[in-house]
């Protein structure tokens, strides 16, 4: 069992064994080889139908293509021939032509008529992106709906605000969640804009002029677009890839926000914080060696997606530099990159739904932490109460001093304040206690929550 | 003069010696230290004015702040203290407070009242981004206007379409330029959306609750926003940085398109192609050693920006994972990154204006290249003319064979066609000559150009 | 056949349909799910054997594990359970334990004894990386050997040097290829160093102390390392991922050089240059619509890998920030990223072998281009010949003037030189012709080639 | 004071106001404009000296160049002219030539003789990189030395190990610090290798043949290399940039480790953890609004560098694809990117020295956390004690159950264990207490520490 021999006889395809963790079934289905081939068949069918309608090719081609199903194609063989052809469309069109020729040999010459490889490939992935973006919108919608009820439920649940990972004045859990919701609402808007602006037909022929179609180009284009329910662009965009870059950037931004949610959750789940938790499930988040562990598994998926997405977005941006009418290298760099990004976001959205749909909260622990260090998190509140009397700068300096003394003497902030003659000169015990009450130091929290909920029609 | 000693006594600031090449004066001005401090002063002024109006602080603070100019601040010292404070706002506020205290000591305590460092820093950079995005929109507008006239001038200028860097059927220079214009039009739309969605006020106090302002938060916020002519967000966004990521992504996409323009130009300028050239100017693009050289200097700026932008966008996406109410590390990672991206795009837009404003074209060379290899680029045209007679597949195979023979025998495609009995059976000499006329093989070119120009109101 | 319905019943795994194009069979085999599970079995076997030898666990466990083969494991089920467990090792160990329990129930409790999930996963991927790096070294060696013969064959084949994509003085094809070889030699050295420094055992237990093994930790570690033929690190490195980052960076650098080779090849293959070509093969590089096309398919694979690798390397660097003893998010981000990089380099090396092993060269075209523009590429040579007489600056200025005049008058540089009184005052016709002979203007070319070949023992 | 007017009259250079925070004085000095010009002067001097020695140019040129100092050059003007020339070397050489011409007009024509712009620029930045890498090695050495004493001091200081941000079995602070040291030791090795392999002379003339020097190329090269104390490469490397990519990758890896240190520190400094702290200093880490705050300022610098470095490394990798003999775009993309990386690492190393040189530790808090949740972190220890009696699997399951019950009943793990009949059947109270003693559950900790210290000669 030495290592060099053990690979023998293992000449296997590299399965995607991490799909169940990092992807989602829905997105994987959209980007399967079968789904892509189905989209390609659909393009060729729509093209043939349009050409027939415009009288460019004889009747019957579209019907002959429609009779071919993805199961008639040998995906493995097509994939294999891609290595020589340089793109998937060439062996695909050859295989489709063979299928058509079996039934209608006289028509097989009209398959893919006037189109170039990139037309069928680009349009097919656009159709996949439309499916995937629609799914993402649905998922974002479901998460937002879940967040609306969480925000409402926890709108007054106090916990320490935390800046630079240090405790600050109080916030409510509802406010924290409203921040997540607020960002996701913007992402829904961006996803909709990306869908509208970017998911358009690609159809231009060899060099983007549709020269092979003579004067029929515009009419055929209109029909193909109609057949695929895709908007028609002003002109082909074979080497102008900003639309794909926009989709990638939109996904990357969503991953960033989901990563922030994962970071917050994993920090809240820390043993020493333990204020909120991912849902527990059988076999979920355990450790192979530590019986007491409850790992933030879903958060790790969110964080991993946020670590990986930026590099993939960068690749899509870098691949934009494509040569002349159709480029070399940049186009190829897209093929696996954007689907990979969709895969990551599919898994991250699934993980986010798990977290948000099943979060458990320890409100007592939150409150307890607000009292830590003798309420030192409220020092700002006292500072402002004092500032109203003696000016901000002097109040700030005084509080810094009292807070430091409290730390050094190991007493609570309240006791330190009460024992400071200078403080007591300006504030009464009641005023101090009022300032130290976190529930009274929430400022505009409720207003913000109401505004964010209002955008969901739930204000 | 050994190397280890030569650095002595050179303890200098790292000047930005490549600014004239890679940046633009306008963008550099927007992001200068003085401009940032001016924005910060403006925020503090607007804040004080709002607080006064709402009766939170005594009258006179805003006026006292307004009396301070950026020249009253020691930028070098503020920068130096930033190393200890961890952000620029703390020493800035301290310096401003000192200035105010000189004239109105009793009011100095109300400077920056209720705000946190991130409020003034974020809002100030948002003001810079607004300026910069406005400038970029202007530049894009100017480039698009220039492109409109170029597209019109060259709408019928023939040159080979090129795919995979191989000659294909003809296009016109107008179509190629229309492709650039089409992409830039989308970028203008994106830049406008980014400006509208992302350039909003940041104001939330220590943990995003404006707790220090009690019930006055919303009113003060409204006034600050009004004073800075900035939209008001639903809630503070201290750790939700999708807006900045969107700005970055928008810039990155523009850089991608500009890089594509630079790639196209540098390929057209190649000694062996020599179809179009960057403008010549005294001292421009020469070589230190080769007298005949005419280097694509502006293209190199476009390409360099396109190489550098993806990494910077990735950084902005990666920095989105910020902790709780205000993060550690991610926020800091933004400070130089987004300005750097603006700097690059400033220089790239300047270079693009140079190229597009002064491009010289050798239409004869373009036409000559269309005839290269005996017109082999038109083989598709012949193939389709033939396909109308004998079907696409057979026509394609036949043309492949004739084209190969032409290459092997070193004769023109026309001669090879005329000497092929099989071809002549289906096509007349006139039909062949017609198919080989590039001006007749432009398909939808004029329609596309008209559509793109129509969007500029110039169809 | 509307798009929304067509995905139904397609719930398929996302096959890797681009594997034949972008990856290589050898690398895919190393990273298949079966291969990974085999490595994991191997680790558990080596661990059990070591524990038995040290008397920590009863005899027989290793033998029981060795009796389990990868086919006894249900990979799909293990993958599925990973979604809940958060890592592959937990369901893997559970499945292995079940297998062992069937035969030796009393021993099953000693499977994975003392180790943590990350120990088995990290060590197993290290074993994969060792295999893959070894394969890459072999491939690099084969490419270098091929390059040695190409360099030798073409050492005196003249073609224009090209800077900024403009023709400059001559080089030889051998020199250009020697540059490729020189870089690849450095990469071999780096790959060897990465293999030696980075492919080491991971074994530390829950928090990197091997506490569960009491005093036996060091002895067991030594035995496990011996069993797997892996070097033993100074200490566990669960959250110190610089080794993986170094492997990634090494692969990224190789991709960069391969991308440069692809760029050079695709530029040389341009229709207007046509000096060197990728090998022709049946069904290779054709176009679906243009019969005459010969696409740089292998170059596109090289270029695509070079576009994609930087983002993946960046991800590996970004994932280095892992928390405390074992992190959350960063570790997960590695799992698919580094294998993906290996996949890309596997395909790129295959493509590079195709290009380098079968390149065809048109030496006449190269020579023809040297004479383009009337030999203007040799203007530097004339300039230096003249500089020896009248100083460099004056010579440079004079040549610039004559070159410009030659361009404007449409005559060759030679004729322009001969018709310049000022030139002829200092140079004879023979001297001019000598300067214009590219074979005499190669400077140190042969010395460089000899040095690079010498490193392969082929000087 | 409306925003659109406020930028007027601010046409300023963009100062690097964040230099004191993100960079270091030493690195900034190495990369100042003056330092670069000094290096360029040095190259031209060494070149002239070599040419004189080989009799290629007349005596006196080197002396004339040596008489020119950086203060004789107008850096701003040179920078300005770079925008037209496309690189810094052309206006630099022009300015130098003018200086030389003032004193020795007859020699000025021999300045920069035989070299190309890229020779002087590349070699000069290589000299800068050598300085900077040497500085980085020194800094790493100092940090390692500091870590050696910290590791020794805290080798037995107990704190919870933490995995997935959850408490696990104990480690010692010394072990955690030894992990940092172990990684930094590898980085020192990498930095040394990068320095040796990558910091070599660039000298090849226009297209990398040194044709202008005829047969003298090799001899001149040897002398220039000697003059600059730089190794001589096998051949010029104008478009083979793997050396620069390796330097970048090395810096990126170091930033990754420093980011991990920053993450650990900022997590330890959390209000709820508060086990270790960055050093306190006047004006350091305070908050503009929260008096009690103690922000992890140095950690934020470490983290920000780790967020930014990956994108910059990716840019260096992406820029490797350079065309033919000298490229367009890729070269330019390097100029600011690698210095920026050095800048970031300069600041990060400074921050790391602050943290490591002045860390304060609360060993009591660490011990306290080990006892949290009733010692649940030691559950693994009990599990293994039990496993020795009843097998690992059964023990693990039993402990999971007891741990969960302890949590639900709110009692300590010890009490839960003592009240479990099933546990007490196999373990005595003493055995339980022994298992729950963290100091007895450190496994190989001391061995690891000794190994790491041994590499510093401090075992």
Image (cartoon, coloured by chain):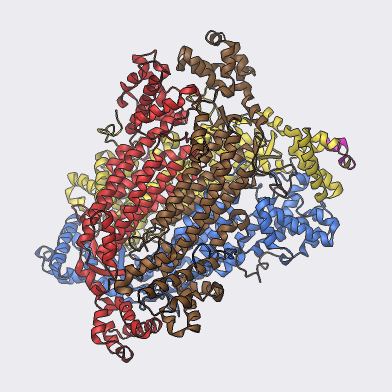
Chain colours: A yellow, B blue, C red, D brown
Residue C247 or residue C386, whichever sits in front: C386
Place residue B137 in its image quadrant. bottom right
Total label count?
0
Side (left or right) of D18 relative to A318: right
Label the magenta part by its dominant secondary structure.
helix
Place residue D211 in its image quadrant. bottom left
Reply above or below: A50 against D168. Answer: below
Which residue of the protein is positioned furthest toward the right in this rendering?
A425
Residue drawn at 43 percent across, 70 percent down: D46
x then y, percent, for residue B450: 41, 68
Q: Is residue A428 magenta?
A: yes
Reply above or below: B360 against A101. Answer: below
Is there any visible trace of residue B167 in the rendered image?
Answer: no
Q: Is residue A115 magenta?
A: no
x then y, percent, for residue D434: 58, 17
- Bounds of the magenta segment: A423-432
Reply above or below: A163 against B35. Answer: above
Residue drawn at 44 percent across, 78 percent down: D61
Q: Specify the quadrant that holds the C terminus of chain B.
A: bottom left
Is there any visible trace of residue C152 in the rendered image?
Answer: yes
Residue C99 or residue A316, whichever sits in front: C99
Side (left or right) of C57 relative to A85: right
Side (left or right) of C443 relative to C322: left
């Amino acid at each position: 069992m030495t290592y060099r021999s053990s690979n023998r006889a293992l000449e296997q395809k590299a399965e995607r064994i991490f799909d169940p963790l990092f992807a989602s079934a829905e997105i994987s289905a959209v980007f399967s080889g079968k789904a892509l081939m189905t989209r390609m068949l659909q393009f060729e069918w729509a093209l043939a139908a349009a050409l027939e309608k415009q009288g460019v090719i004889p009747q019957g081609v579209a019907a002959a293509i429609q009779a071919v199903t993805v199961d008639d194609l040998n995906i493995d063989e097509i994939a294999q021939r891609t290595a020589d052809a340089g793109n998937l469309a060439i062996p695909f069109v050859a295989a489709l032509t063979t299928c058509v020729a079996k039934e209608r040999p006289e028509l097989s010459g009209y398959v893919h008529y006037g189109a170039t490889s990139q037309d069928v490939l680009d349009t097919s992935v656009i159709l996949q992106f439309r499916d995937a973006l629609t799914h993402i919108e649905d998922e974002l919608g479901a998460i937002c709906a879940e967040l609306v009820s969480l925000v409402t439920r926890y709108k007054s649940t106090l916990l320490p605000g935390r800046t630079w990972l240090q405790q600050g004045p109080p916030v409510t859990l509802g406010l924290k969640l409203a921040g997540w919701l607020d960002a996701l609402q913007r992402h829904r808007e961006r996803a909709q804009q990306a869908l509208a602006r970017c998911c358009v037909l690609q159809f231009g022929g060899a060099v983007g002029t549709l020269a092979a179609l003579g004067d029929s180009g515009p009419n055929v284009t209109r029909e193909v677009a109609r057949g695929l329910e895709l908007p028609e662009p002003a002109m082909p965009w074979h080497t102008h890839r900003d639309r794909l870059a926009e989709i990638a950037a939109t996904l990357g931004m969503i991953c960033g926000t989901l990563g922030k949610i994962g970071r917050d959750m994993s920090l809240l789940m820390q043993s020493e914080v333990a204020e909120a938790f991912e849902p527990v499930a059988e076999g979920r988040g355990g450790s192979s060696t530590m019986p007491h562990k409850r790992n933030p598994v879903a958060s790790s998926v969110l964080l991993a997606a946020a670590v990986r997405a930026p590099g993939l977005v960068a690749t899509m941006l870098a691949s934009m530099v494509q040569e002349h009418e159709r480029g070399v290298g940049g186009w190829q760099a897209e093929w696996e990159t954007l689907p990979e990004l969709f895969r990551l976001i599919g898994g991250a959205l699934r993980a986010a739904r798990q977290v948000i749909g099943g979060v458990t909260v320890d409100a007592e622990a939150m409150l307890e932490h607000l009292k830590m260090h003798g309420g030192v998190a409220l020092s700002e509140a006292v500072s402002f109460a004092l500032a109203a009397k003696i000016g901000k700068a002097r109040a700030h300096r005084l509080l810094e001093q009292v807070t430091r003394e409290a730390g050094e003497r190991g007493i609570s902030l309240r006791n330190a304040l009460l024992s400071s003659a200078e403080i007591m000169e300006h504030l009464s015990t009641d005023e101090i206690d009022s300032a130290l009450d976190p529930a009274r130091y929430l400022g505009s929290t409720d207003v913000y929550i109401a505004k964010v909920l209002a955008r969901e029609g739930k204000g």
